[in-house]
Image (cartoon, rainbow, N blue to C red):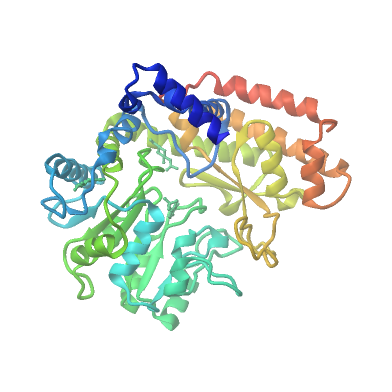
């Protein structure tokens, strides 16, 4: 296959006026038809499917142009005005513009806050903060992953230190109160007093509620810890020392990360110097300037009234979705949502997230299975080689509204989404009861088989989903 495409490529070149150097000017379509065709297929898939993965979004054509620009050619280790290579006069302006826009987009005073826009993504940004503020084996506390926290906040199992964070630092999770689905701050406080962490991390990947920042600030102060927020949504700056964020989720920008830090020393540490040094030369080399260029474009957009309207629409849509699911009899973790996602506990229906995810996927609805608090079996973790102690069948699903809101969905569309998901759950229940065996694998093989008896109903659901999405184009298509 590879050889064939090289041949096609060489033929294309020889067909040009015999000048091999013109290959640089071939479009992707001509230079690499195989890759071009795959990208086109992915574009069609994105356009067709109902995208409900809470951490995904659709960036704009303008951001894609910046990311695909000549900025990808440039090496620029260091910071603006202090680079290791020449030729950075425009790159410096790009990065400075990006920093200024980042502070402005979050309403921050340049005297009090600074920002590093070079982190390559969210997880590296977090590790850079740990490198800056902690010594190896210092103690940290983050929300446990099975209760909605992020891997990079220190996840480990009884047998294995899974995240690099838990390999290099000592991690003690805090958790949700399983009876309410809200963070158990009393337990966090008690544990923090005993454990004396150096850093407490707020923020989550699958928690449908806001954090209580004043309470967390108090706990951090009581034990002499830094408070960092790994920001999903709301504005935590007032209470935090450091705030990290991805740039491709809430900001709808290129894939990347940012670290905001207070300029005044905290607990005797100059955060600015420590964090900039941890990014480079600590953990990274040359920044991705094309990403920084794209980020600057999206941060400019983030200050527009249109973007603010989008954000409140994301939350209203999520409330509409939560309301309709509740009417349909579903149990939501914490009973609702304050942000862009809901977590549905499917255990009362005696069905699980893995089966529902599979059926919905076959109907062009993309979302993910998720563990829910109180689950006896551990969490779903598909990439671990040692799965013996991990459940393959988590009890819930996570549904996010951001991506489809970007495509123009309103509350009534999310009522339809809830109903489509409900139809999918009904089909899953039927398929589970008629599957030839009790195992997940039996179910998966059964629903994939050409003679799956519910195929007609599934196709009908898929057609109605695609009829809905076809009215809402994706950016750049
Ligand atoms: C997505 C996410 C991350 C990680 O970001 P990557 O860019 O995937 O590395 C970290 N923390 C939270 C809360 C996230 O949601
Ligand atoms: C990126 O930008 C920096 C300055 O911001 C510059 O020095 C560097 O050459 C650029 N290169 C890349 C690859 O990002
Ligand atoms: C996607 O973008 C919208 C607004 O542009 C934002 O409100 C939403 O939070 C973003 N999605 C995620 C997952 O952060």
Instruction: Check the image and name the residue furthest to the bottom.
Output: 194
Q: Position of residue 416 (x, y in %)?
A: 61, 28
Question: Residue visible at 55% across and 30% down?
Answer: 4
The quarter of the picture where the C terminus appears is: top left
Residue 329 makes an appearance in the image? no
Q: Ligand 3 lies in which image quarter? A: top left
Position of residue 323 in the picture relative to residue 12 (left or right)? right
Q: Position of residue 176 (x, y in %)?
A: 54, 64
Q: Quadrant of residue 181?
A: bottom right
Image label count: 0
In this view, the residue in front, 243 or 60, is 60
Q: Nearer the viewer, residue 254 or 73?
A: 73
- Residue 300 in sight: yes
Horizontal side, residue 452 vs residue 18: left or right:
right
Q: Can you give x and y, in whole percent of width and height, for residue 150 in the image?
A: 48, 58
- Towards the viewer: 156 or 141: 156
Residue occupying image coordinates x 71% and y 33%: 423
Dividing the picture into quadrants, the one containing residue 271 is bottom left
Identify the residue shown where x is 86% and y is 43%: 435
Residue 96, relative to residue 41: is it above or below? Answer: below
Give the percent coordinates (x, y) of residue 156. 54, 70
**Relative vertical location of residue 314 with respect to residue 229 in this rendering, above or below:** above
* Relative to 211, 17 lies left or right: left
Left or right: residue 136 versus residue 364 is: left
Q: Nearer the viewer, residue 20 or 269?
A: 20
- Considering the image in quadrants, where does the N terminus appear? top right
Does 369 sit above or below residue 64? below
Image position of 8 with respect to 266: above or below: above
């Amino acid at each position: 296959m590879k050889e064939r495409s090289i041949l096609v490529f060489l033929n294309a070149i020889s067909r040009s006026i015999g000048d091999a150097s013109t290959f640089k000017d071939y479009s992707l379509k001509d230079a690499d038809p195989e890759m071009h065709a795959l990208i086109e297929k992915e574009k069609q898939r994105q356009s067709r499917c109902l995208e409900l993965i809470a951490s995904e979004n659709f960036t704009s054509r303008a951001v894609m142009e910046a990311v695909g620009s000549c900025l990808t050619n440039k090496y620029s280790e260091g910071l603006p005005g202090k680079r290791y290579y020449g030729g950075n006069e425009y790159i410096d302006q790009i990065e400075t513009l990006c920093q200024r826009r980042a502070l402005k987009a979050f309403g921050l005073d340049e005297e009090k806050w600074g920002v590093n826009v070079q982190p390559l993504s969210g997880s590296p940004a977090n590790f850079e903060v740990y490198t800056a503020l902690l010594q190896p084996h210092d103690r940290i506390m983050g929300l446990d992953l099975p209760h909605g926290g992020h891997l990079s906040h220190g996840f480990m199992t009884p047998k294995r230190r899974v995240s690099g964070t838990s390999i290099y630092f000592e991690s003690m999770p805090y958790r949700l109160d399983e009876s309410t689905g809200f963070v158990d701050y009393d337990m966090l406080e008690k544990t923090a007093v005993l454990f004396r962490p150096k850093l407490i991390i707020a923020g989550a990947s699958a928690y449908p509620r806001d954090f209580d920042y004043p309470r967390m600030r108090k706990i951090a102060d009581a034990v002499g810890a830094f408070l960092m927020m790994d920001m999903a949504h709301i504005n935590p700056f007032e209470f935090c020392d450091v705030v990290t964020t991805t740039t491709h989720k809430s900001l709808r920008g290129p894939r990347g990360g940012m670290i905001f830090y207070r300029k005044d020393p905290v607990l005797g540490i100059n955060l600015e110097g420590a964090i900039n040094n941890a990014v480079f030369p600590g953990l990274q080399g040359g920044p991705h300037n094309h990403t920084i260029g794209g980020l600057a474009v999206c941060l400019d957009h983030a200050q527009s009234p249109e973007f603010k309207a989008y954000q409140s629409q994301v939350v209203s849509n999520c409330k509409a979705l939560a309301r309709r699911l509740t009417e349909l009899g579903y149990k939501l973790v914490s009973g609702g949502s304050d942000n862009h996602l809901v977590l549905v506990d499917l255990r009362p229906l005696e069905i699980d997230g893995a089966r529902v995810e599979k059926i919905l996927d076959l109907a062009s609805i993309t979302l993910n299975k998720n563990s829910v608090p109180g689950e006896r079996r551990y969490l779903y973790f598909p990439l671990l080689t040692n799965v013996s102690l991990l459940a393959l069948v988590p009890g819930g699903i996570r549904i996010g509204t951001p991506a489809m809101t970007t495509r123009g969905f309103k509350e009534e569309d999310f009522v339809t989404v809830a109903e489509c998901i409900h139809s999918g759950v009904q089909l899953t229940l039927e398929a589970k009861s008629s599957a030839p065996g009790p195992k997940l694998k039996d179910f998966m093989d059964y629903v994939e088989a050409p003679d799956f008896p519910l195929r007609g109903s599934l196709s009908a659901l898929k057609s109605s989903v695609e009829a809905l999405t076809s009215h809402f184009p994706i950016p750049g298509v």
